[in-house]
Image: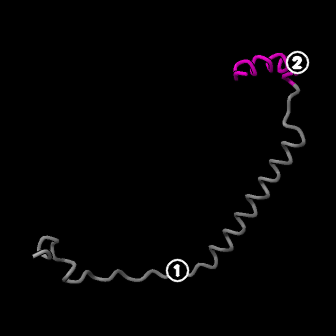
Amino acid sequence: MYATQALTNLVPLAEELDKNKVTPGVLGFIVFAALAVGVWALMKSMNRHMGRVNFEERPAEPASEESAEPVSAKRK
């Protein structure tokens, strides 16, 4: 069975639904609420982990004389 045949069989079913009364329903709300709780938990965890980070930036070390030479001079 081709995809176009499957779609033509579903068209009459879609016309029977009242387009003004189609809503996500309770299942849609539960899924949305679960996603919201999951995002909240991830953000709280990330905030806790970022608070534990101890980062102190070291000053940049000056380039040594060896690394200042051009590459072609090193090959000789």
> Is 20 placed above or below 74 here?
above
Image location of residue 65, percent across then percent down:
19, 83
Q: Earlier in the sequence, mark 2 or mark 1?
A: 2
Disc nearest the viewer among 2 and 1: 2
> In this figure, which residue is indicated by the disc labeled 2?
16
Residue at horizontal 45%, vertical 80%? 57
Direction from residue 30 to residue 43 in the image, left or right: left
Image location of residue 73, percent across then percent down:
11, 74
> Is 42 placed above or below 27 here?
below
Residue at horizontal 83%, vertical 16%? 12
Quadrant of the rendered image containing residue 67: bottom left
> In this figure, which residue is indicated by the disc labeled 1?
55
Q: Main secondary structure of the magenta part?
A: helix
Residue at horizontal 35%, vertical 80%? 60
Direction from residue 64 to residue 35 in the image, left or right: right
Quadrant of the rendered image containing residue 28: top right
Quadrant of the rendered image containing residue 5: top right
Q: Residues within 10 Å of mark 1 (few under 14, many from 20)?
A: few
Tell me the kind of residue under disc 2. Answer: Glu
Image location of residue 51, percent across then percent down:
64, 76
- Determine the secondary structure under disc 2: helix
Which segment did they paint magenta? 1-20
Direction from residue 75 to residue 51 in the image, left or right: right
